Amino acid sequence: MLAPLPYPPAAPTPAWCTMRGARRTNTGDAVITLKSYVQGQWVEGSGDFATLVNPATEAPLARTSTAGIDFAAVLDYARREGGPALRALTFAQRGALLKRMSKVLFEVRDALIDASIANGGTTRSDAKFDIDGATGTLAFYAALGDKLGNARTLVEGPGEQLLRSPRFCGYHLKTPRVGVAVHVNAFNFPAWGLAEKAAVALLAGVPVVSKPATATALLAFRVMERLVEAADLPLGALQLVCGGAGDLLEHLGPQDVLAFTGAGSTGAHLRALAPIVQRSVRVNVEADSLNAAVLGADVEPGSDTYQLFLRDTAREMTQKAGQKCTATRRILVPATQLDRVQEDLVESLSRVRVGDPALDDVRMGPLATAPQLRDVRAGLELLQKSGAHIVFGSATDVAPAGVPAGKGYFIAPVLLRADQPHAANAVHAHEVFGPVATLMPYRDAGDAAALVARGEGSLVNTIYTDDRANLETLLFAIAPHSGRILCGSAKIAEHSVGPGAVMPSCVHGGPGRAGGGEELGGLRGLDFYFQRTAVQGDRALLDRTLGVAPADAG
């Protein structure tokens, strides 16, 4: 988790926090209309409206629609206005824009937290995780822009001599694509999802159309309202679509890019759309992930590494009610320690109070939507049919604190156990996107690595060990199946942020089931938005044209 940034004290609460434009339902609940920010103005959709609710109480909060919005014109506006405006800025100037964005969001941090609690069902701690991730990632890429300085493009590596004569050489030039980046984000991180994708694209010089998941779009709407109000965004640089995507993707062209976070089935559908296939639209997908935590055979119960393992695993199961792409789904421990680990994890999970996330002593709120609750319950049935059995929690038996009886999309943390892990096929094939994980034994390091590989690609896997030989065996066996590996040990027990924290300096993504994409990773993240072009010619002329110092040219 990124720490709050050391900006000056927050300014007085701006007007956008006062529920302006509220409508009243028959029950007296205030319901606001979420507009889309497109073509330099706020636009209210027409026709059928989707209703956003508080997932703890099921009370309506907002409504939104995109009916009547001309998405072809929205994309054209980004290409025509936003693209040239961003490309005219240096990296340092784009970085200054990101710094302003981070600062103005930090100033209304508490109001954004309130929106997250109300519409996302997050506890205050979970809301901070999302919002501080957003402002922290913007600040990270702001600093990177400052380091890149007054350039507008990048030259990759030293020049290559192409023939016997040293005069004829080649460089690889990186220039921003002259299209638009469409970002389709998941329901679980409305602020972070918007900001981390936008930060990289804007620094690269590519305008953004951001489409949050409709069910939890209130927070993304509040973020965008603040940015429009106070961040001095260049026209067309950042647009927000609140509601259905309509025919948005039908208008993507060969210079455009699409970044999607969500279900693997949806990602596969998007990749197969005719405009994307026929026009070679660049696509990045972050999808399902059956992340694993592996406890090394050398780790003794009660040790610092063992406590780190327990702490991380319980948190990754319950933070944001398990609705994280980085959450731990499979817990692999030596067979000799299976009972002890089960006992200790059950003790940790039993202390998690479930209920209205607005209450200070509640540690886990509801799932975000009614369909999400149905999917989790169905997924639990599938895991049990595959050979896993519940050792803690229940699919239906939960009494959330501070919530009227029968209201809210709640489920208790659920720990399952599969004593025959190789036969429990669904455990390695189906992600239950909630506070659910399965405990399994392994025989040796090779067996543990084979079980991890059954997941067919993960965003993040974790290895807990203090033994170098054990780490070496597991690390190199698991790496091909992982986008990221956290190596937990005694020496980092006090410093580790856990596997769930996505750091902007490291790549985020994973192979296979996880989507096969990469985001962030510091400067690496910009490559998705650049065109890499081989430029060949006279070395001296190219050095002057590309701004390459002679010392860098050999």
Image (spheres, grey):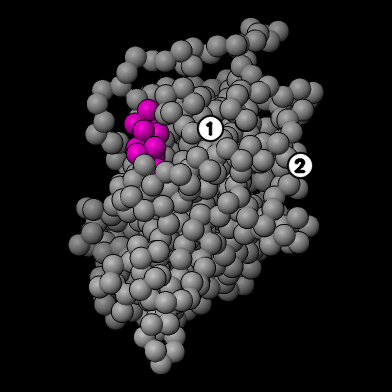
Q: Is residue 179 magenta?
A: no
Asked if one can make out residue 70 in the rendered structure from this viewpoint, the answer is yes
Task: Name the element at disc 1.
Answer: loop
Q: Residue at x 24, y 56 (%)?
A: 493
- The disc placed on residue 247 is 2
Report whether 489 appears left or right of 23: left
Dot 2 amino acid type: Asp
Number of the front mark, 2 or 1: 1
Report how far apart the C-alphas of labels 2 and 1 lie in the structure.
23 Å
Q: Nearer the viewer, residue 490 or 112?
A: 112
Q: Residue at x 76, y 22 (%)?
A: 46
Report which quarter residue 290 is drawn in. Answer: bottom right
Count neighbours of disc 1 (C-alpha within 10 A) and say few if under 14, some if 14 to 19, many if 20 or more.
Answer: many
Numbered range of the magenta stretch = 94-105
Is residue 317 shown above or below 417?
Answer: above
In x, y percent, where is residue 141?
A: 37, 47
Q: Residue at x 34, y 25 (%)?
A: 107
In x, y percent, where is residue 137?
A: 38, 45
Q: Residue at x 28, y 36 (%)?
A: 5
Asked if one can make out residue 197 in the rendered structure from this viewpoint, the answer is no
Is residue 388 shown above or below 221?
Answer: below
Which one is earlier in the sequence, the residue at label 2 or at label 1? 1
Is residue 249 shown above or below 267?
Answer: above
In x, y percent, where is residue 347?
A: 38, 47
Residue lying farthest left?
491
Q: Which quarter of the figure is the N terminus placed in? A: top left
The main secondary structure of the magenta stretch is: helix
Dot 1 amino acid type: Leu
Is residue 490 shown above or below 37?
Answer: below
Q: Where does label 1 land, which residue?
A: 235
In x, y percent, where is residue 224?
A: 51, 29
Q: Which quarter of the figure is the C terminus placed in? A: bottom left
